[in-house]
Image (cartoon, rainbow, N blue to C red):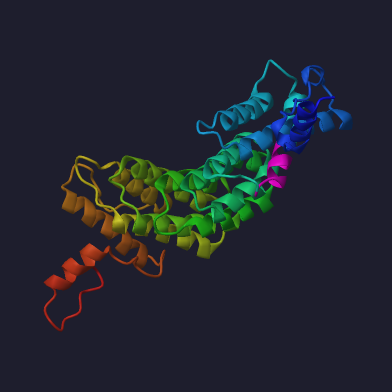
Amino acid sequence: MTRPALLAIAVLLLLPVPVLAQVLPNLNEIRQRDSIGPGDEGTIRQFVEELARKMLTDTSEDRSGMISARQRLLSEALRPGVSTEAFRQAFARITVDVLKQNDKKAVSQAARVNLLMVAAQLGQLNAVPVLRSALENDPYSASRYWAARGLAMLAPKIVENVVPRLEAEIAESIQKALKPGVSPLVLEPLFEALGRFDHEQAHDVLAEGAVFLAQNTDPSDAVVERLWSNVIKSVARAYEHEVRPDAKQRLLYALAAMGTNLAPTPDGPRLGVELNAALMQLTGKEVGYSPRDSAVLQRLALMEWVEQLVRDNRITKRPPLPKAMEEAIQREVAPGTAPTTGG
C-alpha cells in the first residue's frame, strides 16, 4: 500500500464518529402493530434518540436539521391513519422519556425551545416534570410559553384521569411564575389550566393570580382583555365549586380587586359587564351597574360592589386602589384630613 494511501487511512481514523451519519431504524412493521413489545420499544427508542440528538445539537445556520427532527418526532407520534394507536402512544411516551433524559443537552436557545415544543404537544402526563421545570427556571420567554401551553394542553387529560397530585404540583409552579414582567402570552395558558382544576391549591393560586393580574396588567390590550375575561369566568366557577369559607372569601376578594383596577368605558364595557354579572350571580345582589352609563358611573358602580362585599362581610378588607387613583384622592383631601374609607 502506498504511503499516501496509509496517510489517508490514518486521517480517516482520526475523524470524530459523529461525522458519519447515523441511520434511523426502520419502523415500517412496528407502525402497524396493535401491541408494542419490549423489543419494539427498544427499536423506537433508538429512532427517537437519534432524532433527539439532531434536534438538540444542530448548529447549522438555518436550523434545518433541528426543525426536521422536531417535525419527524411529532409526525410519528400524532399522525393518525399512518400507524396504530398503540404505536403512537408508545412513541409519544418513549419520546418524552428521551427528552427528559437529555433535558440539559440543548446547545442553544432554539434547541431548548424545540425540545419544549415537542414535549408540550405529545399529550403525555409524564411530560409534566420537564414542563414545570422549564416554566419555573428557563430564562427564555419562548421556552416558558411552550411550557405553559403544554401544561394547559394537558389539563383536560389530568382532570379526566383524576390526578389531583398533578393539579397541585402545576398550581405550585404557576404560583412561582406570577412575577412582574411575565408575558400575558405565558399567563393566558397558565390561567387556562388553573380554570380547569378543582384542587384546593389550584383555587387558592387562581385567587392569588387574579389579584396579581388586576394589579400588574392593563386590560386595554386585546390579549390581556381576553385573559381578564377568562379569569373572571374561572374565578366565578371556582367559587361555586369551593366549599371552604376562607377560600370563597379569597375568590370574592379577587373579583373585588379586578373591579377596583378596572376602568370600563361606554366604548369598551365588556369586562365591566362580565364582572358585574359574575358578582350578581355569586351574591344574588346588584348595584345598578349599566354599560350605557358614563365611564365615571361604571367605575363607581364597580367600587360600590367592593363596598357591598365589605358591608356584607363577604370580604374582610378593600383591595388597595390603583396608585393613580390613590394619588388623585390624596390631592383632593385637605391637609391633615384622612380620606374616607368608603371611597
187 displayed left or right of 10: left
The residue lying toward the viewer, choosing from 200 and 306, is 200
Principal secondary structure, stretch drawn in magenta: helix
Q: In this view, does 9 lie to the left or right of 333?
A: right
Q: Quadrant of residue 120?
A: top right
User: Percent x, y for residue 101?
Assistant: 72, 46
The quarter holding residue 216 reads bottom left
State the residue in front, 295 or 139.
139
Residue 321, placed above or below residue 92: below
Q: Can residue 119 be seen in this view?
A: no
Farthest front residue in view: 3
| Residue at left offset 49%, top offset 49% | 140
Q: Which residue lies furthest to the top in this view?
A: 81
Residue 327 against residue 114 in the figure, above or below? below
Q: Residue at x 11, y 78 (%)?
A: 334
244, above or below 236, in the image = below
Q: Nearer the viewer, residue 313 or 272?
A: 272
Image quadrant in which the N terminus is located = top right
Left or right, residue 139 beside residue 13: left
Where residue 136 appears, x then y in whole percent? Answer: 55, 55
Query: What is the span of residues highlighted in magenta in the rendered image?
Result: 95-104
Looking at the picture, tell me which residue is in the foreground, 163 or 152: 152
Asked if the stretch drawn in magenta spans residue 325, the answer is: no
Residue at 36% across, 41% down: 223
Residue 267 visible to the viewer: yes
Residue at image location 24% in from the left, 54% down from the top = 301
Q: Where is residue 5 in the image (x, y as percent from the top left)?
A: 78, 26
Please identify the quarter of the rendering in which residue 273 is found.
top left
Q: Where is residue 20 in the image (x, y as percent from the top left)?
A: 73, 29
